[in-house]
Amino acid sequence: MNRALSPDSWQYRELNKRAPSLATLANTLIELAEVGHPVVAGTADLQHSNGLIGFARRFPERFTQFGISEQNMVSAAAGMATTGVMPYVATFASFLALLCCEQIRMDVAYCAQPVRLIGHHTGISLGFYGTSHHATEDIAIMRSIADLTVVSPADGPQFAAALRASVHHPGPIYFRIARGHDPVVYADGAPFEFGKAVVHGIGSDLTIIACGMPVHSAKAAMEALNGKGHSVGLIDMHTIKPLDREAVMVAARKSRIVLTVEEHNVLGGLGGAVAEVMAEEGGGARLLRHGIKDEFSLIAPPTHLYRHYQLDAAGIESVAQSLLA
Amino acid sequence: MASSGANQWPSNSPGGKISDEQAARLRERARFVRLETIRLISIAKVGHYSSVFSCAEIFSVLYYDTMKLRHGEPSWPDRDRFLMGKGHAAVGQFPILADLGFFDTSWLDDYTRLGSPLGDHPDMRKVPGVDFSSGSIGHALSNGVGMALGGRFQNQDFSVFVLLGDGEMQEGQVWEAALSAASHRLSKLVAIVDRNGYQLDGKVDDVVAIEPLDEKWRAFGWEVHEVDGHDVAALANLLRAVKADSAREKPCCIIAKTVKGKGIDYMETEPGWHLGYLAPEDEALAREAILAGAQ
């Protein structure tokens, strides 16, 4: 019989060794609850996948296991928030943003409840689990919902910083995070502000605007291209809504080319948001949106998918190089 | 924040039986709901008369007998909560909320006009006293699950009442919520199914059959009661007993047998009245019928 994955099991310990940021969500929520924030958490049968089992063990009375009922979880979180608690509910991004879209719109965003929705294993990070488990539309859907803040942290430390900032954020938030195997871009304690992009540099030739896990690869690509004599910059647009329009326009005015990079359909996501700003404000730069090109993603191990879709460092460098030629 | 019995309003005696005088008052408040519904829909020129008329007694009993509320304090943290799965009956809820001092009664005079907070469905961002917005059928029981969980986390002593349409039983999310409420032993959660038998496209059991409803709720782990949803004394006594039962660990479902359009004979027999408009001369006749009726 296939037994449940216990946090004491070999498998779980090995997984955490390889992927320490899997514990970021639970550890940061524990930290926030311990200093008195009214944090409660819940999940839909994925406490091992998102690591919330750690929170459940520390604060069992503040944790709700909803089972496989994602829509119920989102609506219940909104109801819970009316009593003065701050719910953080997590499930796979593909289910949270797509299956629960209407519950998020009506019960969370329209009712202005401070629910924190955590869509994990987003983009193509679930690899061979297949297209059903890939979330390549969630940014487009979530950013079209009024009053909902949409955040795609680059790594564990930035996610932790965003979670810490979230207790002071009055409205609802959709967090789009990877699976915890994310390479680290930032040091612990790096500053974070909702709606304020992290500018790693503005290139006169090209500036990459990226979000989420591809920020790490984009940074490596930027460094490689600068080493070859190009002037390439990078903006980490961790908050997709409200978008840092000023940062976009600095790139649009100072760079010849703007390249958006995201683990998402090029339609409606970060590239779409940047395109809207550049179309409205002008600036002169050429824009190319790089990501999943309006197709259903393939089945493969994640690293193979990042290579296939040119979302690894070599792929992003190659796409940028072709534009610079 | 602890509740203060002295300030509790309206005064009731949980667990006890209601008096004839109290029952007469509840019947009068149900008539008030029906008459105000007719008046408000005459402003909008279209509305859900019959959906309100099936739950007018439920509104009356909950707001004027069962629920712990404070007049003029819609956000009192220890108040009992009321959620409307069948949000389209809000036109019957608004006059009560104004009557309880949650907002000025003059708001009712502009029902649905441009800029009015009062529309066909209840909106918590706009209307004091609406504990949660609705409009998309099937969410409210989940919202109630969350409120009951939140109350438990916060050590607050309030009950949560959720009024569900019987057509709403066709929404899958209702059953997700039903499962989780029983699993989390939310004994402070009470669902009331307004079993009037009709939905927009016809008889509920012709559209998609939902019976045996009592067995379904029981199988989902709920304590189930059935009651005549127009008998204010039976409803009030049942709700008092349910609320007073501190030994119960299960959530409670009350299947209220009702008549859609109750009080207006042709609405009771013609399912097309789910959404309608009474011409001024018919409106006067409807008022007379309500005032003459025993309900």
Image (spheres, coloured by chain):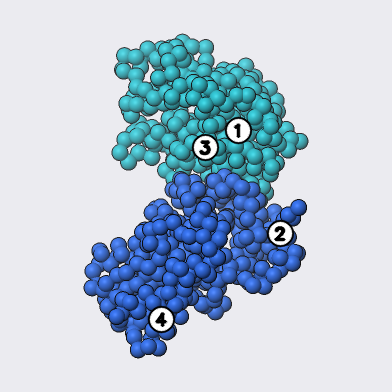
Chain colours: A blue, B cyan
Q: Secondary structure at mark 2?
A: loop
* Of the two numbered discs 1 and 3 in the rendering, the one whose residue sits closer to the viewer: 3
- Label 3: chain letter: B
Label 3's element? loop
Tell me the distance, in whole angstroms, between the alpha carbons under discs 1 and 3: 12 Å
In the image, taking residue B155 as reference, residue B118 lies left or right, namely: left
Disc on res. B191: 1
C-alpha separation, residue under disc 4 versus residue under disc 2: 40 Å
Residue at the spot of label 3: B138
**Identity of the residue drawn at 62% across and 26% down:** B213
Q: For the residues marked 3 and 4, what is the alpha-carbon distance in whole angstroms?
A: 49 Å
Helix, strand or loop at mark 4: helix
Residue type at tag 2: Leu
Badge 1, how many Cα within 10 Å: few under 14, some, many 20+?
Answer: many
Chain that bears disc 1:
B
**Marks 3 and 2, how far apart in space?**
33 Å
